[in-house]
Amino acid sequence: MFVTDIRKEFYDVVVNQRVALLISSDIDALCACKILQALFHCDQVQYTLVPVTGWQDLGTAFLEHKEQFHYFVLVNCGANVDLLEMLQPDEDSVFFICDTHRPVDVINVYNDTQIKLLIKQDDDLGVPSYDDIFRDEDEEDGDDSGNESDLGSEPSGKRRRFDEILFDYEQYEYHGTSAAMMLFELAWVLSKDTKDMLWWAIIGLTDQWVHDKITHMKYVTDIATMQRHVSRHNHRNEDEENSLSIDCMRISFEYDLRLTLYQHWSLYESICNSCYTSCNFKLWSLNGQKKLQEFLADMGLPLKQVRQKFNCMDISIKENLRDVIEESSNKYGMKDIRIQTFGVHFGFKNRFLASDVVHAAAALLESTEKDESASDTFIKALDCLSRSNLERLHLGIDLAKKKLIAIQQTVASCICTNLILSQGPFLYCYLMEGTPDVKLFSKPMALTLLCKYLLKAFVHSTRNKRCKLLPLIMAAPMDVEKGTVIVAGIPPESETSDKKNFFGRAFEKAAESTSSRTLHDHFDTSSNKTGKIWLFLIELKTEDRTKFLDALITLLS
């Protein structure tokens, strides 16, 4: 059931209990976790933190802790499956679920005792009414019990209507309001919100934008909500003595450039490795490189300045850099080079944009270092969100630069060698084993960024109008020893896209019809005991890849 009073129905219930926090491995979930930890420290709530990377992890974590805990808080996992069916908990176990994955499973919505959903109700959830789903089913059992021999195996009209309603509701995957924003609202209601919590909520929202999980309209609306909180905090702290101290924290609304990590890189490298500018200039081609040189010349910026670290550029250039870049960008068709976001100052020296922190935390979370477990990378990513651990944040930014360079080089390679094939109803690209940095793309967030970047680049480079309207399916080696590949599907490239993904049903049917051996362990591939998948990310046996692909072509044609 949906929680309507988050303070009374959630926080007041757990504040005197021992709580298990089961946190998904994504940046929004990390930020929500930091907010919850801060609140629990305020009220001395005992909790155990367990990072979970997939459904198997979640099941294992629950089995290990179900004897010690009755209250479980799940962040960015659990809402889009029948959780009680999956975990088989005792009747006294209660699950509080703060999850952005949509659609929410209808069994979770209408369970009044064990499932409590910390989900914003003004999101367009479109949950079918209880009568449409359950009451008709009960009546059908009573009405049709004597007519089974007449009907045979044909479903009744009511059953068909039930299936249609459920199909319409569950066919698309999308994301709702950030979990970090939801828990910041809890802190605000409790009058315990701090600037650190506000900054974590902003990072959670920015994660949704960076990884293209929400629409532009949703992002702008939520940015406006955060801006009101920022104004409130800045006004509240105006008269405080430490507002200009060396360890103060200042959050500001920015209308900044869509150039990734440019304040921690050189401007030239940021332009070359940012998806927005790289695709608009087509930097994988000689003409694109030439156009970039013309763009820099149009801005009147010396190459020496552009190629050195941003911090070392002349102050006179940096002062009006954003306006200069925006003016020149408009001439080159990049009319939305600037985006609404937030920045933070720690003391007088360290300045970061929210997107900088998202990229740094994602790089740490999906580190491919040999000796690091999933728990190690989770803790490092969590640590980099604390202002007391700026060294870890800078380390994450360095890793993020390497990741962005790898993505840009892979995109250039795929475009130049024509690795993107039109398979009829969709585009397809397969990264072969041995491709540089291929290990990096066995990670969900890195593969998702590569997919988005590659599809955008292809749309800018192709002259085929039909191909510009097609979705992309991409496969990359997952685990060579186990012989698995990871397969991702993303909807067509469009600025007005509603960010709803339709590949879940198609993947499900293709896997079933070909008996492909799949593993639906990612939270972006909801699975239940029937093995059904609703979202867009699966693992697949390498030798099943071809028949799975053929089945998809047949289904979507």
Image (cartoon, rainbow, N blue to C red):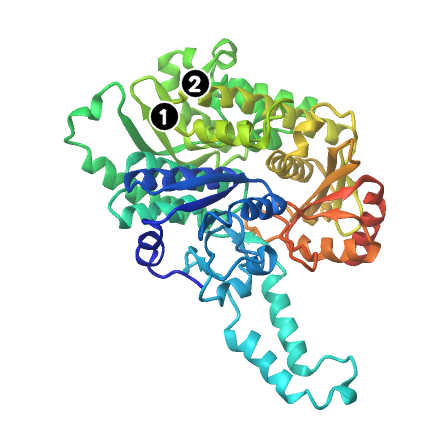
Residue under circle 2? 391
Q: Secondary structure at mark 1?
A: loop
Q: Vertical placement of 380 versus 156: above or below? A: above
As drawn, which residue projects farthest toward the front?
67
Q: Vertical placement of 194 versus 131: above or below? A: above
Asked whether 443 or 174 is in front, the reply is: 443
Q: Amino acid at mark 1?
A: Arg
Q: Residue at x 36, y 35 (%)?
A: 199
Q: Residue at x 56, y 33 (%)?
A: 276
User: Residue 76, how many percent across, how many down?
Assistant: 50, 47
User: Residue 1, how many percent across, how many down?
Assistant: 45, 64
Residue 36 figure quarter: top left
Q: Residue at x 16, y 29 (%)?
A: 240
Q: Vertical placement of 134 versus 199: above or below? A: below
User: Residue 544, how many percent across, how many down?
Assistant: 83, 45
Asked whether 441 or 499 is in front, the reply is: 441
Residue under circle 1? 387
